[in-house]
Image: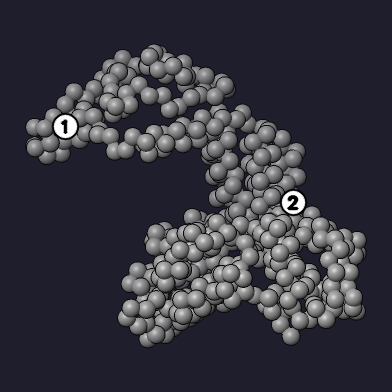
């Protein structure tokens, strides 16, 4: 008999639970599906949130040929075979055949390269599913040809809806006469993962005789596991990395080492941890200690070279160094402020003195005229306009209160006394 999760798999968007930001009436993915045409995209989110189900529903609703590959056991040969079959099933005026690739982040560069031409020409419409950030795991040429839609862990209401649907509609569970007296423990064990929730319900009811009463005590006794155990593929994955980064940001090396140990014991990918350390060094330590980024990047390289178990040592070293470093987010805030300014002011012209003049015509138009070469002046500085005229004098970098940036602030106030930071 198929497991409960398979028996309950929805076949239409109306039956689909969760991800309302994508599939509710008027939402971006729903509108694309209702139009009868979809472009290639990647679904990014934790396990058990409906990525595979959504892909199958889309193929069914569009009446399109549907092919599926798993990155775990498929190579370039299998990819090319599927593309050849899809090309033969392509008909003018109809939706291109859909190729669904589960765990696309596990595809090598050559495997991902083999998809490019078919995606670009429309031979296939690619739907990828991944639990990892596509920015790091999917090659840029393929990523540029796909939209990325983020799926979220199911919330309490979604999970309760799924539980009641299972108890009320599944023939096997109806025979068991299941009573959901308490659900807190069941929801806690599932961690926002619908597949895990239904698997637990299947386990709790498989050998029980009717009627089956489910309450918190029964769940805890039967499952005999720690509901707070780290799950590198579940919601805890995101909660613990969040606690880890916030402990570093909060300058607590003891807590940071604890959360690091939780991830190591849980079998987390060391490169995932190292990536987050590089981000933290840039976002939270920043200019207060620029060496932090160098050390975090060195830790990333070391982990990639030596792996486990020795990789825990450079990770711990970087963790303690970042946690004990002074903190600054001035560069982080500065670039965000600059991006907002660009979005509101548009493409302001570059001042003529800052433009290059590689041709005679450009020189005649005044490109580069009036540029002051700073190294020709005392202190290697000459005041001149570097911003477009419309935003001249705008201050985007606001130094934080630490010795390194205090020195930078002092120099900037000497150079630009009219700009108050």
Is label 2 in a helix, a strand or a loop?
Answer: helix
> What colouring does the structure picture have?
one colour
Q: How many marks?
A: 2
| Residue located 75% across and 38% down the image | 254
Q: Measured from the top left, where is residue 215 in percent x and y?
A: 88, 63
| Residue located 80% across and 78% down the image | 174
Nearer to us in this view, 124 or 291:
124
Q: Quadrant of the N terminus?
A: bottom right
Write down the residue under mark 2: 262
Q: Mark number for residue 367?
A: 1
First in residue order: circle 1 vs circle 2: 2
Residue 105 seen in render? no
Is label 1 in a helix, a strand or a loop?
Answer: loop
Q: Measured from the top left, where is residue 332 in percent x and y?
A: 50, 35
| Residue located 49% across and 64% down the image | 30
Nearer to us in this view, 8 or 15:
15
Image-based side of 98 in relation to 400, left or right: left
Nearer to us in this view, 420 or 79:
420
Vertical order, 312 against 397 (above or below): below
Residues tagged 1 and 2 counted as in contact (Cβ below 8 A): no
Nearer to us in this view, 88 or 345:
345
Q: Measured from the top left, where is residue 216 in percent x and y?
A: 87, 60
Vertical order, 69 against 164 (above or below): below
Vertical order, 416 against 136 (above or below): above
Image-based side of 227 in relation to 92, left or right: right
Q: CA distance from mark 1 to mark 2?
A: 58 Å
């Amino acid at each position: 008999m198929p497991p409960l999760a398979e028996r309950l798999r929805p076949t239409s968007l109306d039956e689909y639970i969760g991800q309302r930001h994508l599939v509710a009436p008027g939402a971006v993915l729903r509108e694309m599906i209702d139009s009868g045409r979809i472009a290639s995209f990647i679904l990014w989110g934790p396990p058990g949130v409906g990525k595979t189900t959504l892909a199958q529903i889309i193929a069914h609703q569009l009446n399109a040929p549907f092919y599926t590959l798993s990155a775990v056991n498929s190579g370039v040969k299998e990819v090319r075979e599927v593309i050849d079959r899809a090309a033969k099933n392509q008909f003018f005026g109809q939706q291109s055949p859909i190729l669904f690739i589960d765990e696309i982040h596990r595809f090598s560069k050559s495997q991902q390269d083999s998809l490019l031409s078919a995606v670009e020409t429309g031979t296939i419409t690619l739907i990828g599913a991944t639990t990892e950030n596509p920015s790091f795991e999917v090659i840029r040429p393929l990523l540029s040809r796909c939209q990325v839609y983020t799926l979220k862990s199911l919330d309490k209401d979604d999970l309760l809806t799924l539980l009641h649907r299972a108890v009320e509609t599944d023939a096997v569970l109806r025979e068991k006469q299941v009573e959901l007296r308490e659900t807190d423990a069941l929801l806690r064990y599932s961690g926002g993962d619908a597949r895990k929730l239904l698997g637990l319900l299947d386990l709790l009811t498989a050998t029980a005789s009717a009627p089956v009463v489910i309450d918190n005590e029964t769940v805890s006794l039967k499952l005999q596991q720690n509901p707070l155990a780290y799950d590198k593929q579940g919601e805890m994955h995101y909660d613990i990395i969040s606690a880890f980064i916030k402990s570093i940001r909060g300058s607590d090396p003891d807590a940071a080492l604890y959360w690091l140990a939780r991830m190591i014991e849980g079998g987390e990918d060391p490169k995932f941890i190292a990536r987050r350390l590089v981000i933290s060094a840039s976002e939270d330590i920043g200019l207060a200690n620029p060496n932090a980024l160098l050390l975090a990047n060195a830790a990333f390289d070391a982990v990639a070279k030596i792996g486990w178990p020795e990789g825990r040592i450079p990770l711990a070293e970087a963790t303690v160094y970042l946690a004990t470093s002074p903190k600054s987010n001035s560069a982080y805030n500065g670039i965000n402020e600059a991006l907002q300014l660009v979005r509101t002011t548009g493409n302001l012209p570059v001042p003529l003195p800052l433009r290059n003049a590689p041709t005679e015509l450009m020189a005649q138009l005044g490109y580069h005229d009036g540029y002051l070469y700073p190294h020709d002046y005392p202190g290697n500085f000459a005041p001149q306009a570097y911003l477009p005229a419309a935003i001249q004098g705008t201050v985007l970098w606001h130094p934080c209160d630490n010795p390194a940036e205090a020195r930078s602030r002092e120099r900037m106030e000497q150079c630009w006394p009219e700009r108050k930071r």
